[in-house]
Image (tube, grey):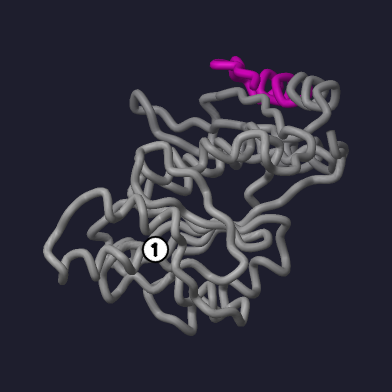
Amino acid sequence: MNQRAVTACVLVIGNEILSGRTQDTNLNHIAVTLGGWGIQVREARVIPDVEEDIVVAVNEARARFDYLFTTGGIGPTHDDITTDCIATAFGVDLVESKEIAAIIRQRSAPPPVMEARMRMARIPHGATLIDNPTGGPQGFRIENVFVMAGIPTVMRAMLSSLEGKLKSGPVVRFRSVTAYLGESQIAAALGTIQLDHPEIDLGSYPFFKNDRYGTSLVMRGIDESALETMLEEVKAAIVAAGEVPEDIKAG
């Protein structure tokens, strides 16, 4: 396994996400799935169905990260412009995929409907297909950019087909512990612990439960030994602040 971190960016494309009419669930699934494969999602953006915005975002992200995954905007309607924008970003023409066209033509439809569906058969020149186990039109890949559907069930099926086909780095592991303490009560100790272990990311997340304030402390890193050491120090800090560490988890 490659010990260099392999990074990814996710672009969620669609006005319906930005308007709040549709709630995105794809980012969470992509981040969790890629994380298990040793690919770290380092950035995510939600952008509108605007050509210039998509082209700029694609070109910025594909240059900065090992992989770019997009969801949304590859359907049959006028506002499904992701495929066109990806072709523009790479400076290539659109071509009809015979494989996708054959799948689309399996379902008969009046000519206007079929014409709209055939928009989904267009892919950038040089792209390869991403399998769609649901049986519908495939997504596509061009260089390090993976273009997938926005419908969650279809996106998940497409992503699953990529397992074992991407380069990977070390898998990020975690430790977590909960304490019924306000963040300010433990902030100084956490700051010291983080400075002593820069290779581990220590996050503090407040909550209110059972009429009490508390803090969830999450440690993330690739070194299991360092994670265990930090966990013990965090637990000791909780005890020193007068509380009991609870709900200790590892993964």
Q: Is residue 8 above or below residue 74?
A: above
Q: Residue at x 71, y 51 (%)?
A: 7
Residue 172 appears in the rendering? yes
Q: Is residue 110 left or right of residue 15?
A: left
Residue at the spot 55% in from the left edge and 31% down from the top edge:
216
Residue found at x 62% / y 76%: 90
Relative to the observer, which residue lies in front, 192 or 153? 153
Q: Identify the image quadrant of the C terminus.
A: top right
User: In this orientation, does residue 43 appear?
Assistant: no
Q: Secondary structure at mark 1?
A: helix
Q: Is residue 55 above or below residue 45?
A: below
The magenta stretch spans residue 247 = yes
Can you give x and y, in whole percent of width and height, for residue 109 in the image?
A: 15, 58
Which of the 4 image quadrants contains residue 68? bottom right
Determine which quarter of the picture holds residue 63: bottom right
The front one of 243 and 157 is 157
Answer few, some or many: residues within 10 Å of disc 1's Cα (few below 14, many 20 plus, some between 14 and 19): many
* Residue beneath the point at 79% across and 35% down: 170
Residue 158 point in image, percent of width and height: 47, 43
Kind of residue at badge 1? Ala
Quarter of the image containing the N terminus?
top right
Measuring from the top left, give residue 222's x and y in whole percent: 79, 32
Figure quadrant of residue 186: top right
Q: Is residue 159 above or below residue 139?
A: above
Tell me residue 129's x, y (percent). 53, 53
The residue identified by callout 1 is 121
Q: Which residues are magenta?
A: 233-251
